[in-house]
Amino acid sequence: MDYFCNQLKTSVSNLSYWERSSYFHDVDVVIIGAGIVGLCSGISLLEKDPGLRILILERHYLPLGASTKNAGFACFGSPSELLDDLKRHDESKVFSLFKRRFDGIHKLLTYTGETAIEFNKAGGYELIHPKHSAISISQNELDYLNENIKRYTGLARYFYFDDDKLQKFQLNGFTRLIANDHEAGIHPVKMIELLSKLYTNKGGKILYGASLHTFTENDIYVTIELHDQTKFKTRQILFCVNGFAKSVFPELEVQAARNNVFVIQANKTLRLNGCFHMDRGYVYFRNVDGKLLIGGGRNQDLENEFTDEFGFNEKINLFLLEFAKENILNGDDFQITDQWSGIMGLGSEKKPIIKMITSHAGVAVRMGGMGIAIGSLVGEEAAQMIYTNLNQQQ
Ligand SMILES: Cc1cc2nc3c(=O)[nH]c(=O)nc-3n(C[C@H](O)[C@H](O)[C@H](O)COP(=O)(O)OP(=O)(O)OC[C@H]3O[C@@H](n4cnc5c(N)ncnc54)[C@H](O)[C@@H]3O)c2cc1C
């Protein structure tokens, strides 16, 4: 009798033979998180070895972090953001990161193409506001930025003042407008859908609503337990959980940071076209299907926004709405049609953490609010790290 009872105890999760053998048997790599980094890591691993058995686990029916909750900006850094970064980091770091963001978007486009993710290269604009911009920018500073951008990317005269556009875009209260012709808007959900299609077409598996509970490892494999008690083994595990990294690895220097976004229906036709930024990237807005998308404002209440909990901050929301009404909508009334928050992963250094924590568990986290731009390259680097480890294990 005991013999039968012991045998029965192992089948707690009610998986059928087919479910278990399709998803949980002989797994080479489990990736936690189906955001841009998790999917790009999976794609890159399968490019290296199409025979690998990879399973992505995503806790929610949609990615629940930032990859489908950002503002849809393919951006490389505004002048005030770069000048602010230069106060804390050396020149080579700042411009290498600029190049990485630029190259990352190009790699992303090799996966998705432009049309399918509604890549709209209408340019990027930094707006200088007398009250809200912490940094004012001179022609000399733009020349300095342009010189370095050219050195790192080959792009000439990247930023230029184009104040006439303030009127064209019907913007109020700003003193200057700095343009670049290279930034673009994208559709984040279409991007994620295409990346998941590419990943599954290559043979990768993905399960939504599958939340990692715990993992333990020995010399040979990692045992994973999901919240529904499903247990299985994998040879490697890669955490692509960005802002949520600390809940798994408290020692990592990753700070969760929330960002609020609104979509507003204005009473007038919006003339905006492009990606608009103000004050070191803290405030951003664009035209989405004729409506105004505006987000950010985290610096209005920095301390309270270092959180991995979704939700809204009244102070920030009032700031964003008042700012929109005064400076973008000419005081006209409007209706909020959508409102959400997303969680990013920040650190004292603007550099992702891509490293093995143990011999079987690695992380690719802390995208620093730049994951759309750098996610494809971070995925490639993380895949190389896991692939090397897998081969060393054999
Ligand atoms: C409002 C906003 C604006 C932004 N603007 C820009 C921008 O202009 N340019 C730019 O480049 N980037 C921008 N970003 C940042 C960018 O969106 C992120 O850096 C990027 O999406 C991070 O991708 P990721 O895959 O690392 O993490 P995420 O997309 O957060 O994915 C992590 C996933 O891990 C899952 N997960 C966590 N724990 C578990 C668990 N235990 N089990 C299973 N799954 C788990 C989560 O559900 C989540 O789906 C913005 C972000 C926000 C929120």
Image (cartoon, rainbow, N blue to C red):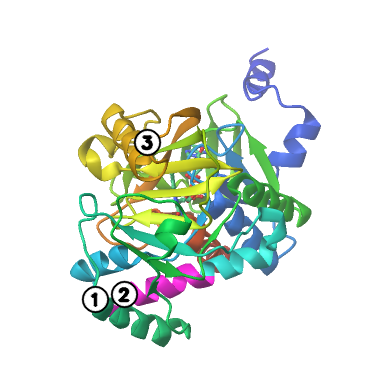
* Mark 2, residue position: 93
Frontmost residue, 141 versus 221: 141
Q: Nearer the viewer, mark 2 or mark 3?
A: 3
Q: Residues within 10 Å of mark 3 (few under 14, many from 20)?
A: few
**Where does the image place residue 227, in percent across and percent down from the top left?**
53, 27
Residue 316, magenta (yes or no): no
Please give left or right for residue 153 compared with residue 323 in the image. right
Residue 41 in sight in this render: yes
**Which one is earlier in the sequence, the residue at label 2 or at label 3?**
2
What residue lies at 48% left-to-right and 44% top-to-bottom?
A: 66
Query: Please, what secondary structure does the residue beneath circle 1 have?
Result: loop
Q: In this rendering, is residue 123 above or below 68? A: below
Q: In this rendering, is residue 111 above or below 10? A: below
**Where residue 110 is drawn, which disc sits there?**
none
Frontmost residue, 310 versus 392: 310
Q: Is mark 3 within 8 Å of ligand 1?
A: no
Q: Is mark 1 within 8 Å of ligand 1?
A: no
**Where does the image place residue 330, in percent across and percent down from the top left?**
39, 41
What residue lies at 30% left-to-right and 27% top-to-bottom?
A: 314
Query: Please, what secondary structure does the residue beneath circle 2 have?
Result: helix
- The reply to whether the C-beta atoms of the residues labelled 2 and 1 are less than 8 Å apart is yes
**Which one is earlier in the sequence, the residue at label 3 or at label 1?**
1
What residue lies at 80% left-to-right and 33% top-to-bottom?
A: 18
Q: Residues within 10 Å of mark 1 (few under 14, many from 20)?
A: few
State the extent of the magenta-drawn residues as a range. 91-103
> Which amino acid, by three-letter code, is at mark 2?
Lys
* Mark 3, residue position: 331
Identify the residue at the far top of this view.
Answer: 1
**Where does the image place residue 147, in percent across and percent down from the top left?**
35, 85
